[in-house]
Image (cartoon, coloured by chain):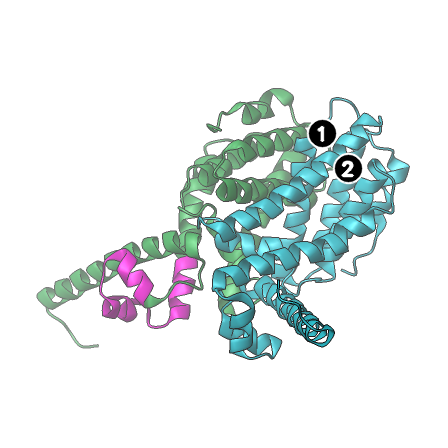
Chain colours: A cyan, B green
Amino acid sequence: MTPISQDVAQLIDGRRLRGDASRRVVLESAADLASVEGLDGLSIGRLAAAARVSKSNVATLFGSKERLQLATIDAAVQRFRETVLIPARVEPRGIRRIVALLDAWIAYSRDRVFPGGCFFAAVAADLDAKPGPVHDAVARAYDDWDSYVTVAVGYAIDQGELVPETDAAQLAFEFMALLDASNTRSVMTGSKEPYGLARRALVSRLIAAGADPAVVRPLAEVDDGA
Amino acid sequence: MTPISQDVAQLIDGRRLRGDASRRVVLESAADLASVEGLDGLSIGRLAAAARVSKSNVATLFGSKERLQLATIDAAVQRFRETVLIPARVEPRGIRRIVALLDAWIAYSRDRVFPGGCFFAAVAADLDAKPGPVHDAVARAYDDWDSYVTVAVGYAIDQGELVPETDAAQLAFEFMALLDASNTRSVMTGSKEPYGLARRALVSRLIAAGADPAVVRPLAEVDDGA
């Protein structure tokens, strides 16, 4: 243990802080860029240009392209949590939380929280046939979201808000299918109409599973600006 | 009009035939490759290596990367028609045709008719945020399939096999969402289980719209080999 002076400690802290700040800035750019061009197009040079930092700076921060890709996925997961999961927590567990989650997801895609639409959809097709740690990180993000929705549906069943025969994993699959389709179609056509199609399907599905129409119908009444 | 001898005419025909045959071979390779790596990765050099023909041969056949990409999309549309649309025509228009279409689509994805799963899903995410003729060709292919399913649902409504309140475009959107989700999830995880989730959802949705359970239930009873 070498004792270091207060001044030197402060200097090191300051450097680390600046390093963390540039890391964050670069990763936010990287996630935006990958949502449009895919994770494969995420070279250190391309990113340095987009984030307006030097190539050597990006190289120092991340080392390899693969480490950069993995850190970008982490940053995207964080942004997804802050935009979709955390805001929905103001609603109590059960059907209200589910409605809040579905609505927040549609807003996340519709408002282009990532410029290329849902980050995970954008990078999944790129990677799904190529094995490796980057593929696994994207698959894990999908899986985590799937489990999150399944657990949320489970609470609604346990609380008697959905009929007991409801298969939580099946319903979660259907919700994600409708959300993903609205994102893909909207990004492809530039229209907001697919969100209305998804909203109507989600509401019918919830009502068919026993949800209180008064609680779930507002989800279909939001105007996404088609 | 320059008169040409029988021999010369036969020679030209033979050359055109060989040109068409190599064109077809190269395009089949191109569609396979793009289903895994995306249309962006479809360089003339990369394709020449995959199809085992010379670069100059591929360049002579297609000229530019964009023309190659457009021809590849055409070839993929053709293969999709032959695998999904044409076989379903053995069933009469209406609910039986719809069940045959949905079953053929699942087999098309499950059997990896394109090695990367559904060709259009694989290339859509790559292109959806990038304007141009290649984007438009993929969007048109989606749109054509959407219209095809919507018309098929319309026949079932007109024949009284689905309740008259059924919204054909809405139902087509839901079918495509479930099919696409099963493809994405299966390609990402390597599991065949997502096809079972899609089958069950499709059957419930059809029954909820008034379809005869005896006609649609077999769709959920196929074992995809999970």
Q: In the image, what residue occupies the spot 82% across and 48% down?
A: A88
| Residue at 55% across, 72% down | A58
Mark closer to the observer (2, 1): 2
Counting from the top left corner in percent of width and height, residue A103 is at 79, 49
Q: Quadrant of residue A37?
A: bottom right
Can residue B149 be seen at all in this image of the molecule? no
Residue B57 in which image quadrant: bottom left
> Relative to A165, does residue B97 appear above or below in the rendering?
below
Q: Which residues are magenta?
A: B45-73
* Of residues A108 and A15, the one drawn nearer to the viewer in this rendering: A15
Residue furthest right as drawn: A214
- Residue with the mark numbered 2: A204
Q: Is residue B46 magenta?
A: yes
Residue at horizontal 53%, vertical 71%?
A60
**Given the image, on which type of amino acid does mark 1 rest?**
Ala
The image position of residue B76, as x and y in percent, is 42, 52
Query: Where's the C terminus of chain A, which quadrant?
Result: bottom right
Structural crowding at the residue carrying mark 1, measured as other residues with C-alpha within 10 Å and reported as few (<14), some (14–19) or many (≥20):
some
Dot 2 falls on a residue whose secondary structure is helix
Residue at the image position 50 percent from the left and 39 percent from the top: B105
Q: Chain of mark 1?
A: B
Give yes or no for contact between labels 2 and 1 (Cβ–Cβ under 8 Å): yes
Query: Do the residues indicated by labels 2 and 1 lie within the same chain of the protein?
Result: no
Report which residue position mark 1 lands on. B208
Give percent across and percent down for residue B102.
54, 36
Q: Report if residue A144 is visible in the image.
A: yes
> Is A136 on the left or on the right of B53, as rendered?
right
Q: Amino acid at mark 2?
A: Ser
Instruction: Please provide percent x and percent y for residue A95.
Output: 83, 36
For disc 2, the neighbor class at 10 Å (few under 14, some 14 to 19, many from 20) is some
